[in-house]
Amino acid sequence: MMSNPITNIKRMEIPEETIKERNLDDVARAVSENKEAILKGIELLATLNKSDTLDTVNALVKHKEDALENVMGELNKPQYSGTLENLSKLFLFIGELKVDEIQYFADRLNSGMEVASTSEDSVKTSYVDLLKALKDPEINRSITMLLHFLRGMGREQKT
């Protein structure tokens, strides 16, 4: 004898009050776990509101299509074409820069500026002082580096 197929499935219904309690528990847990971020968010919103920027941002988000259309309309004006062309060239140029090498030279430049800013301006340097300074390893290293830089900068570029 074969059993009859099940044709009536009664789903277990969870009371709405239980669902609300679970949802509130989930929200309370999320608030507790993200307390610092929520407080920072509230502080950011308060700052934007005090500076009357919140209304501007809100309007911009609500009307983003109109705002984008206006911006694009402005950028299409002839007076901005040169700026936009230069901007694209700037991005290409930045992509070619060797950032690690620039950082190295920037650090050295900052170090030199610190020493220069603490030196006395009233001291005069004679030719003999310059010749003596070449014997200082730090000065000699800097001058050698500067000469190599100038030599590299003056070379003809191979294209």
Image (cartoon, rainbow, N blue to C red):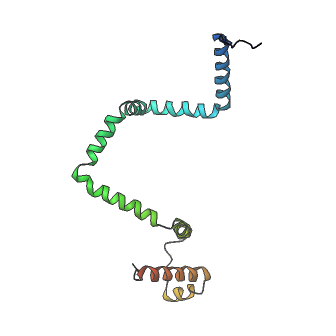
Q: Is residue 145 left or right of residue 25?
A: left
Identified at 30% across, 39% down, the residue is 69
- State the residue in front, 124 or 143: 143
Q: Is residue 144 left or right of residue 2?
A: left
* Residue at the image point whose x is 33% and y is 37% from the top: 67
Residue at the image point whose x is 45% and y is 66% from the top = 96
* Image position, residue 99 (x, y; %): 52, 65
Estimate the x, y position of residue 9 in percent, counting from the top left. Answer: 66, 12
| Image position of 65 with respect to 98: above or below | above
Q: Quadrant of the N terminus?
A: top right
Q: How many marks?
A: 0
Tell me if 87 is positioned left or right of 114 in this view: left
Residue at the location (50% across, 79% down)? Answer: 146
Quarter holding residue 137: bottom right
Q: Position of residue 22 (x, y in %)?
A: 67, 18
Q: Quadrant of the rendered structure where residue 4 is?
A: top right
Residue 32 sits above or below residue 85 on the image: above
In the image as oriented, which residue stretches furthest toward the front? 1
